[in-house]
Image: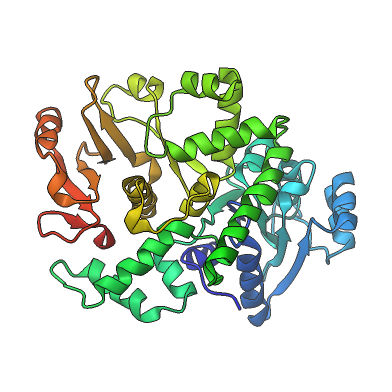
Amino acid sequence: MYIRRQVHKEIANHLQRKEYTIISGARQSGKTMLIRALFKEIKKDNETVNYISFEDIDILTAVNKHPEELFGFVPRPKRILNGANQSGKPFYLFIDEIQLAENPSNLLKYLFDIYGENLKIIATGSSAFYIDSKFKDSLAGRKRIFELRTLTFEEWLIFKNLTDLYEELKIIRSQKNYVSANKTELVEKFNDFLLFGGYPAVVLENDKEEKIKLLKDIKNSFLKRDIDDSGISNTEKFYNLLMILADQAGNLVNRNELANTVGVDNKTVDKYLFVLQKCFHIELLKPFYSNLRKELTKMPKLYFKDSGLRNIALNRFSDFKYREDRGTLLENYVYNRLTEIYDSDSIKFWRTTDKKEIDFIINTSFGQGMAYEVKMNCKKIKRNIFSIFNESYPNYTPDVISYDVNPDCKWVLKL
């Protein structure tokens, strides 16, 4: 059974546009289920629609010879004649695993230029790494890429059939002074989400040991595909780096230290980080400076896109309440939550040479924004850090995001 994802509506709306719709994201995040659901919706509307997968070796072999070979497997739409498209509805074609093609960029460019609005392609690609490396020609104006992430906490509640708690969470976030009677149960579920993350198959599994086995499979099998496809030869050192990064989530990324610890050179560390980013496993957060040059050259901070992958890299699944890294998991969650609300390019962190730091700065084009510090216990915040920051940046509103409920701080589930 397909459970509707939050990005579903946005993607469905884009199907009416002539640009091709590309859905990318980490392996096992649910891309195939999503496009199958979209396929069924369009088919119900009596549109002309077909579905193929490039995992079919016969289709892939043919397409790699020439894009026109595709139409040995699906009907051929009308070509553009003298710059004019046919009247009427387009031909919809869903392609799963498009990154398997030798040159998906040339394929899409050819089809778009030859068939125009007569052919609408909706395709999945398992990672941005493939799209970046194989989409060699410019597809500007011909495509839009949507990222399908692992489940958010709201989606997690829906997948667990906890619709009452989902509705409660919406009320908590929409009403400033609302006090939830279900706080204890909601926090308990939130703790579970922080431990095992949002991979759909993991979320739908109820047994803890089976969840861990599924996460191990994601790390050892599906992440291994990313490693192999990216040309990384020393998988042991790659996994060692992954484990180190997992233990340092929320901290500065010092490439020299990482290279020395893992036993590789800086270029290799850069390649490992590049693959982890482009395969949607980590993100690097830039520092906040009014001087753009400093922002680009200073060390970034690192966060994992899914806490389950982060925890399986450490093989650490003890109860959240007793973990020493609770603050790290909370900060990692807040970062991912902020990327749901704001454009990721507008999120930064602030750190001075004497190590005064604010976790997240939300910047706007008008020189205004928010400054957020994340704490397990609201009372432990040293608010003078905000005063120091506001001396240089008075147009930013400071706040604390805390795990505990306190009227002086923003509760994390209200975020």
140 vs 113, left or right, is left
293 vs 47, left or right, is left
Residue 253 seen anywhere in this rendered image of the structure: yes
In the image, residue 313 sits, relative to residue 75, either above or below, namely above
Q: Position of residue 305 (x, y in %)?
A: 47, 48
Which residue is rendered at x = 53% and y = 49% of the image? Answer: 315
Q: Position of residue 356 (x, y in %)?
A: 21, 28
Residue 136 seen anywhere in this rendered image of the structure: no
Instruction: State the count of labels.
Output: 0
Front-most of residues 343 and 258? 258
Which residue is rendered at x = 57% and y = 25% of the image? Answer: 262
* Image quadrant where one finds the C terminus: bottom left
Which residue is rendered at x = 54% and y = 50% of the image? Answer: 312
Front-most of residues 57 and 337? 337
384 vs 290, left or right, is left
* Image quadrant where one finds the N terminus: bottom right
In the image, residue 258 sits, relative to residue 151, either above or below, namely above
Q: How is this picture coloured?
A: rainbow
Q: Position of residue 285 (x, y in %)?
A: 39, 36
Front-most of residues 78 and 83? 78
Which residue is rendered at x = 72% and y = 54% of the image? Answer: 97
Q: Position of residue 347 (x, y in %)?
A: 33, 41
112 vs 202, left or right, is right
